[in-house]
Image: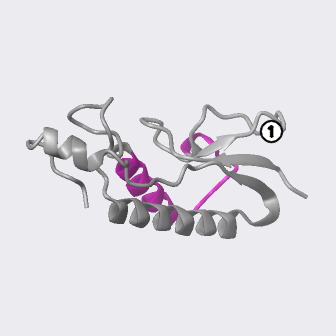
Amino acid sequence: MTKGSLRFFFDYGARGCLWADRLMPPFMTFKGTLQCLPEISLFRKVHSFISRLDQEHASYLNPFYPPGPSLWTQAKCERFNDNVDQLLVSLRGELGAEFVMADEQKRHTEVPTLGEFLAANPNQKPMR
C-alpha cells in the first residue's frame, strides 16, 4: 500500500526536489521540502546528491542576465539530465512502493540562441 504520491522536480531556490501531491493523505503534511518530512528518511548520500543537483540547477539561469539564455552548453545539459535520471532511480529505489513519484523535471537542452548571445556579450562564457 502506498503512503501517497510525490512530484519530482527542482525549482529555483526551493532547496529540494520532492513535493507533496495535492492528493497526499492528511497525515503527510509538510511545507514543500523533503527536510520537513520526518516520515521519509533517505541515505545521506542521496541528500548530498539532491543538494548538489539543486545548486547546479540554480546555475541554469544566466547569472549575469537572468532573462537571457542559459549559458549551459549541450554537454552540460546532458550531464545534468543524466544526473537527474540517476537521482530519480535512487529515490525510487529507496522509497520503494511506499510512494508513487511523478517525474516532472524538465530535461534541459542548449538554448539555440546561445552562440548569438555569446558573440554579442563577449564578457560571458559558456558553462561546459
Please identify the quadrant where the C terminus is shown.
bottom left
Residue drawn at point x = 78 percent, y = 55 percent: 100
The kind of secondary structure element at disc 1 is loop
Name which residue type carries label 1: Met
**Secondary structure that dominates the magenta span:** helix
Residue drawn at point x = 38 percent, y = 54 percent: 110
Residue 73 position in % (x across, y down): 31, 58
Residue 40 position in % (x across, y down): 67, 53
Q: For this rendering, which residue is in front, 116 or 61?
A: 116
Q: Residues within 10 Å of mark 1 (few under 14, many from 20)?
A: some
Residue 17 position in % (x across, y down): 55, 47
Q: Is residue 89 magenta?
A: no
Which residues lie in the magenta part?
35-57
Res. 94 image quadrant? bottom right
Res. 63 image quadrant? top left
Residue 126 versus residue 79 in the image, above or below = above
Q: For this rendering, which residue is in front, 84 or 50?
A: 84
Residue 59 position in % (x across, y down): 32, 45
Please identify the quadrant where the N terminus is shown.
bottom right
Q: Total number of numbered labels?
A: 1
Res. 41 image quadrant? bottom right
Q: Is residue 44 visible?
A: no
- What residue did someone put label 1 on? 24
Q: Is residue 38 magenta?
A: yes
